[in-house]
Image (cartoon, grey):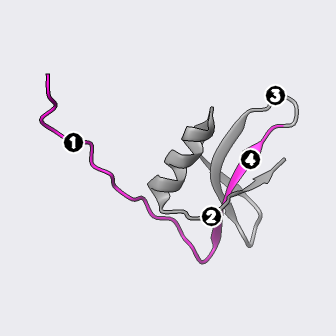
Amino acid sequence: MMGLFKKKSITQSYDRENKIPVIKASICTGEQTAGFKDIHTGKIEEVMLIRDPSDVDCFKTLYGIEGEITKEY
């Protein structure tokens, strides 16, 4: 069966002046989450769980991020 509707690719936005994209990784469990770090307070707002490299690509596409994302432990 052919799908009649395409999934819309909506680009989300974030405060590019005050926040930077980061991947927060746990040293103990290896769990990784993608989110945004406030450059003034250092607080990280977690957005999505990263299970494999395709999730990182999805996060980058969703928010229009180019280049590498820094990891924090």
Label 1 with label 2: CB-CB less than 8 Å: no
How packed is label 1: few (under 14 Cα within 10 Å), some, or many (20 or more)?
Answer: few
Residue type, mark 2 in image: Gly
Mark 3 vs mark 4, CA separation in Å: 12 Å
How packed is label 3: few (under 14 Cα within 10 Å), some, or many (20 or more)?
Answer: few
Mark 1 vs mark 3, CA separation in Å: 37 Å
Looking at the rendered structure, the secondary structure element under dot 1 is: loop
Residue type, mark 3 in image: Thr
Sequence-wise first label, 1 or 4: 1
Q: Which residues are magenta?
A: 1-26
Image side of residue 57 versus residue 36, left or right:
left
How packed is label 2: few (under 14 Cα within 10 Å), some, or many (20 or more)?
Answer: few
Say whether residue 14 is magenta: yes
Looking at the rendered structure, the secondary structure element under dot 2 is: loop
Q: Which residue is mark 2?
A: 67
Q: Which residue is rendered at x = 21% and y = 42% of the image?
A: 6
Q: Which residue is mark 3?
A: 29
Sequence-wise first label, 1 or 3: 1
Q: Nearer the viewer, residue 48 or 62?
A: 62
Disc on res. 6: 1
Sequence-wise first label, 1 or 2: 1
The quarter of the picture where residue 66 lies is: bottom right
Residue 21 in the image, given as x and y percentages of width and height: 64, 60
Residue 43 in the image, given as x and y percentages of width and height: 73, 58
Magenta span main SS: loop
Label 3 with label 2: CB-CB less than 8 Å: no
How packed is label 4: few (under 14 Cα within 10 Å), some, or many (20 or more)?
Answer: many
Q: Which residue is rendered at x = 68% and y = 58% of the image?
A: 69
Disc on res. 24: 4
Q: Which residue is rendered at x = 27% and y = 42% of the image?
A: 7
- Up the image or down, 6 lies above or below 11; here it is above
